[in-house]
Image: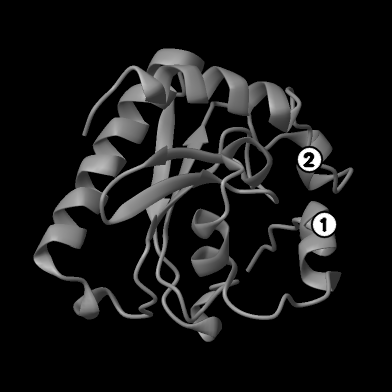
Amino acid sequence: MENLYSPWRIDYILQESEDGCIFCKKPKENDDKNLLILKRGEYTYIIMNLYPYNNAHLMIVPYRHISKFSELRDEELLEMLKMIQLSEKTLTKVYHPDGFNIGMNLGEVAGAGVADHLHIHIVPRWLGDTNFISTIGQTRVMPERIENTYKKLKYEFNKEDI
């Protein structure tokens, strides 16, 4: 078995835990730019991952605090799926990725960093995005500042309705 190292995630791992749920707290604040919230729906929102696996790594999060996919109400499920479509469309338009990883980690043992609040990851992928620098140098190269990524994506997300 080979290992995929992601040492850039150590900042996330070592950070002090916040009181309460970050996915519940963030959308209650009125500071989308600093919180990296790109799009708000009626039941869900799209936020950039502060500790991304790849440039423009997004998450779709229901406002309601639930941990299981089976707990989603029909309207939440439909809006989450529409947010995935919108994210794929927007990321494709802005960054032209070669593919996507879209999925969930349900439960701490499955790798969920925030295990008690369901969220879907959308990670754009490019040929060669895991290359010698990642595998040998154990360093991830992010080609763009997160603030610039936010600015580009926010502009495009604002043009679209779900």
Q: Nearer the viewer, residue 4 or 113?
A: 113
Q: In the picture provided, is 6 more to the left or to the right than 98?
A: right
Direction front: furthest residue: 30
Q: Indicate the secondary structure of the residue bearing disc 2.
A: loop
The span from disc 1 to disc 2 (Cα, nearest Å) is 8 Å
Q: Position of residue 95 (x, y in %)?
A: 50, 18
Disc 1 and disc 2 in contact, CB within 8 angstroms: yes
Is the residue 94 above or below the residue 89 in the image? above
- Circle 1 residues within 10 Å: few <14, some 14–19, many ≥20: few
N-term mark: 1 or 2: 1
> Where is mark 1, residue-wise?
7
**Placement of the N terminus among the 4 image quadrants:** bottom right
Q: Amino acid at mark 2?
A: Arg
> Where is mark 2, residue-wise?
140
Give the residue drawn at x 31%, y 24%. Answer: 89
Tell me the number on the disc at residue 84.
Answer: none
Give the residue drawn at x 54%, y 83%. Answer: 108
Give residue 136's quadrant in the image: top right
- Circle 2 residues within 10 Å: few <14, some 14–19, many ≥20: many
Identify the image's colour scheme: rainbow, by chain, secondary structure or one colour: one colour
Is the residue 153 above or below the residue 1 in the image? above
Q: Position of residue 111 (x, y in %)?
A: 55, 74
Give the residue drawn at x 70%, y 51%. Answer: 51
Q: Position of residue 126 (x, y in %)?
A: 54, 27
Is the residue 10 above or below the residue 71 in the image? above
Q: Nearer the viewer, residue 56 or 98?
A: 56
Q: In the picture provided, is 131 more to the left or to the right than 35?
A: right
Q: Nearer the viewer, residue 146 or 39?
A: 39
Q: Amino acid at mark 1?
A: Pro
Q: Indicate the secondary structure of the residue bearing disc 1.
A: helix
